[in-house]
Image (tube, rainbow, N blue to C red):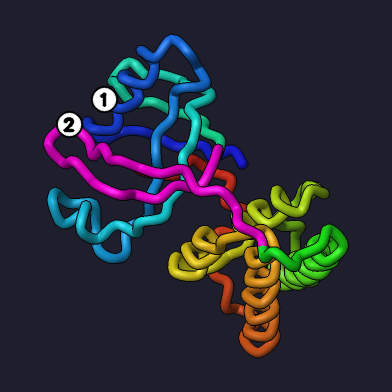
Amino acid sequence: MSTPLHVFEDRYRTLVRDLLEQPDPTRRLFGIVAIREGYEVGAHEARSMYRIGCAVQLRQVRPYDDGRFDIETVGRHRMRVDAVDASGPYLTAEVAELTDDPPPELTDESLRAAAARALATFEDYRHLLTELRGDEVLAGTMPKDPELLSYSLAASALLSLRERQSLLEASSAYQRLELVRYRLAEEIRAMQVLPSLPATEVARTGWSPN
């Protein structure tokens, strides 16, 4: 999944410049970790972070004369934050790459079935959102690979930070697919009761502040 970001804070400008000094584009990686509550402020930021986040690769950069950047990143893998260093211009950390750990009894057929169920629920969710808003939303073709689909559905659904974090922390594509299906079914039921509930920008296609 690619994500556009608008970089304006001094510390993140420094991060982008440091990444661009890396000659190998595949090593231009940094971590994105959600904040449990409040804002990104000093030492409290390190204490309030979730431990599970995502490593992303810097893919495209558009610099501005005033030092800001528009960048595009793509997710590479989940990661666990083991230790944080707040002594530099931006937070750095010791991290461990996380790989999916599917249940030993899981078969390919079961995984494909979970993917089909989750995708069908997402289509119902997308259809209902389109009806409520009066124009097409969350448009696009979803990947067929169950693992990629699990991340795509998690990124596309309008869920709370806590719900998104639970999807990121899921230990396998199967668990992620079942959980996102459950969350989407909850959203569908809520929207049927309160049609005005999803009052956010559904498409989420604009630049994101950092």
Q: Amino acid at mark 2?
A: Pro
Name above or below for residue 135 compared with residue 29.
below
**Quarter of the figure with residue 191:** bottom right
Circle 1 Cα neighbour tier, 10 Å, few/some/many (<14 / 14–19 / ≥20): some
Question: Is 8 included in the stretch rendered in magenta?
Answer: no
Q: Which residue is mark 1?
A: 14
Residue lying at 35% horizontally and 24% vertically, measured from the top left: 16
Name above or below for residue 91 compared with residue 80.
above
Question: Is 87 included in the stretch rendered in magenta?
Answer: yes
Where does the image place residue 61, in percent across and percent down from the top left? Answer: 47, 21
Q: Which mark is residue 89?
A: 2
Callout 2: helix, strand or loop? loop
Whether residue 41 appears in this view of the structure is: yes
Q: Magenta segment, principal secondary structure? A: strand
Q: Are marks 2 and 1 in contact (CB under 8 Å)?
A: yes
Q: Amino acid at mark 1?
A: Thr
Residue lying at 59% horizontally and 38% vertically, measured from the top left: 2
Residue lying at 30% horizontally and 49% vertically, measured from the top left: 82
What residue range appears in magenta? 76-102
Where does the image place residue 23, in percent across and percent down from the top left? Answer: 43, 10
Where does the image place residue 193, in percent across and percent down from the top left? Answer: 65, 89
Callout 1: helix, strand or loop? helix
Q: Is residue 51 shown left or right of residue 105? A: left
Q: Which mark is residue 64?
A: none
Circle 2 Cα neighbour tier, 10 Å, few/some/many (<14 / 14–19 / ≥20): few
